[in-house]
Image: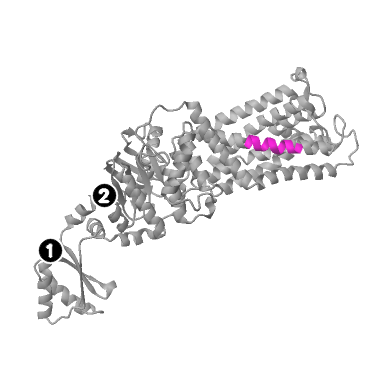
Amino acid sequence: MTTATPSLAPLPASEALPSAFAEISQETLALTRRLFVQLIRRPSTLVAGVLQPLIWLVLFGALFAKAPVGLLPGGGSYGRFLGAGVIVFTAFSAALNAGLPVMFDREFGFLNRLLVAPLRSRSSIVLASVLYITSLSLVQSLAIVITAALLGYGWPGGAGLVLVVVTLMLLVFAVTALSLGLAFALPGHIELIAVIFVANLPLLFASTALAPISFMPGWLGWLAALNPLTFAIEPIRSAYAGDFALQRIASMVVLEAPYGSLTTASCLAILTALAIGLFVAIRPLLDRKLS
Amino acid sequence: MIELHHLSKSYRSGRRNPPLQALDDLSLQVPAGCLYGLLGPNGAGKTTALRILSTLLAPDHGEVRVAGIDALADPRSARRELGYVAQEVAIDKILSGRELLALQADLYHLRRSERDARIAELIGLLGMDAWIDRRCGTYSGGMRRRLDLAAGLLHRPRVLVLDEPTVGLDIESRSAIWQVLRELRDQGTCVLLSSHYLEEVDALADRLAILEAGRLIAEGTPSELKGALGGDRVTLRVREFSDAQEAGRVQALLEGCPGVRQVVINRAQGFSLNLVVEDEAVISRLRQQLAEAELPVFALAQSRASLDDVYLQATGRTLQDAELAVAGLRDAKAERKQAMR
């Protein structure tokens, strides 16, 4: 091999630098690739992430299999009702874990390796996590969508599937922001896992994933109607009911909340606002920790 | 190449404890093509200084320049000139060494065309061919260090900073690293390393600074520092195992000799005597006087001043004693927290 300069000589002051976009995509891609290599070599996260909702779907669906048809608003079997809830819960659980790799990098000092590098933007570190967790949670959710279809719990159709993906992405962005914020705010992975553990099931139970608001006592109905998971579940559920059409997005009521009726469009608007709000809220923390 | 001006840094640990002064008005300069050693016991502030230099930590006061760049005002440009090899090697256990280097190359924006060639070059240089495609989790300490050094060199930095690069390493890895550091220096890189191994700094460094409690207490080339002490070190034993009384008698006798100073009884070594003599001639006079007093000479060893003597002179204790004094006082948890973002 021949090089112009001897291998250990320092590089003379550098020539023209590549564009900001080229540099940011190079560093972001490299960091995202690392997360995927980790996933492929340690696939247990992926497997567990699909297996857990699958078990929910099969066991919970069976638990109420003999519930009388017509018991639920809109009719249909409980399995059909549950499908939307489990899909959203899958994406939510995956996104809630987004902070874990970042926390381990903080603890093991790998983050310091990233911070001494001349990254064009340190948002690359956050961006890589968002890209990774969004793809991972979408893959897991789609696995559940397909399984639900195979179990006879319905299929949202082409336009419905687009709505499912868009809704899940909004929820995933919001939850990822929250999880990344926690990963930088909490002192270690034990605390982070504790928060994830405590947050997970109550958020599921206090949503419309397992039962409609009409089944709940007033106070729980209020909680469910304020729970971000509900704003993702209901549009997806309406898509599964075959109700979704783009021209009716702003008129079709999907949620009868104690405080009023919400359409698909308003649910999506709330999720968008939540995602943006959370990223804005964690911004100062990230700036401080990454500066 | 490296300029640190009046750096101060203190850490808070808990509300009730007073802040711990890690650096106290530290200034030093390292030119290009110089291998510079930062010597001091654990807790002297070496790591803090290096972390500030590598832009991981902001000082309370002071100025940092790397290759002429103000590292506090423009850290990104400074980082491009810097290679940093941390004390605790942070590697991703699940990646192979080659993948880690590729990741690092992308973080430093190496072009794809030059990236693979540069990685291959460093693998050859640091003798990593045999294991570079194995996962990092299987590496020994020496392999990790070499990989980390390669990662620090990928972008051909003008300044290389290493925090205790050879602590706990096998001889082979240590000499491989020393060899590379010397070549780097010869080809114009400014290398700054911290160490609490006297021999390492003595063997490697062109210049060195001794740190104690965050302050610079001596600075110069190893020979300047040792030469400044003057005289030769002598260890004398009149018997293999002497006693306090006899040692006291010999001490009194030696202190009466012209050209002899700093006579100390070393109880830990069978009441041997450590002293400094002005020159060779003093030693033969000494032997004569001992013979006249009918005292035997079991052993008499003479050596030039070492860096340990420099340290002793500057701080009043040996480096080993300083290490022992802080050994029980360090708070590993607090230190981990300081390093964590």
For the residues bearing labels 2 and 1, Cβ distance under 8 angstroms: no
Helix, strand or loop at label 2? It is loop
Q: Are marks 2 and 1 on the same chain?
A: yes
Q: Which label is found at residue B206?
A: 2
Residue B241 placement: quadrant: bottom left
Residue range highlighted in magenta: A133-144
Q: Position of residue B14 (x, y in %)?
A: 44, 48
For the point 69% across and 27% down, the residue is A166
Q: What residue is rendered at 47% in x and 27% in y?
A: A20
Instruction: Indicate the position of residue A154 as horizontal and vertical percent values.
Output: 83, 33
Q: Nearer the viewer, residue A266 or B45?
A: B45
Residue B161's quadrant in the figure? top left
From this viewpoint, which residue is outermost toward the front? A1
- Against A200, is B196 above or below? below
Q: Position of residue A231 (x, y in %)?
A: 71, 29
Name the main secondary structure of what is drawn in magenta.
helix
- At label 2, the amino acid type is Asp
Looking at the picture, how far across and down is residue B132, in whole percent?
A: 50, 50
Residue A60's mark?
Answer: none
Is residue B153 rendered to the left or right of residue B205?
right
Q: Quadrant of the N terminus of chain B?
A: top left
Q: Chain of mark 2?
A: B
Colouring scheme applied when the structure was drawn: one colour
- Where does label 1 land, which residue? B278
A236 relative position to A101: left or right: right
The disc, 2 or 1, on the residue closer to the chain's N-terminal end is 2
